Image: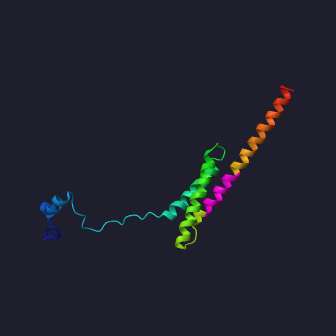
Amino acid sequence: MSTNENKTVNLNKDDYSEEREATGRYPDYPYESYPKPIFNLEKRSATGSFICGLMSIIFCFTPIFPLIMSVLGLFLAHEDKRIKAMSSEPRSSSAVAGIVLSVLGLIINIVIYVLLIILVIFLGTSLYNKFLA
């Protein structure tokens, strides 16, 4: 006798028919399944802060986008700080990196805007003196 002959599985369709008719669906799968992922808001805000700070530095020569990313990165880092303060856990390294990158991106953008304003003023006065004076 082979081992396959000894193993018989009863797959009767009527086993779940009463529950299926009552609920309109099959019952829960009787075997153990993989655990459902736990979404951790602390890690989301810290990672979001890091990504926003990084994008504010990468796109620092575009007009408005890096300012929005810097402010959003600082906001998400503040949210991470608030969540960690309630649970008395230390801050994650990605949140600290997000703060550093967001502040650095904000400083770079402010310097670029100030230099652009100075350039416009300088070019405006030099063109005024050259053509209208």
Task: Determine if the magenta segment contains residue 103.
Answer: yes
Relative to 115, residue 83 above or below:
below
Task: Determine if the magenta segment contains residue 132.
Answer: no
Q: Quadrant of residue 130?
A: top right
Name the residue nearer the viewer: 120 or 14.
120
Name the residue nearer the viewer: 85 or 123.
85
Relative to 32, residue 120 above or below:
above
Q: In which quarter of the image is the N terminus?
A: bottom left
Judging from the image, the colouring scheme is rainbow
Q: Quadrant of residue 96?
A: bottom right
| Residue 83 image offset from top left, x and y in percent | 53, 67
The residue at the point 63 percent across, 60 percent down is 99
Name the residue nearer the viewer: 8 or 75.
75
Q: In which quarter of the image is residue 52?
A: bottom right
The residue at the point 42 percent across, 65 percent down is 38
Main SS, magenta residues: helix
| Residue 2 image offset from top left, x and y in percent | 15, 70
| Residue 25 image offset from top left, x and y in percent | 21, 58
Magenta-drawn segment: 96-107
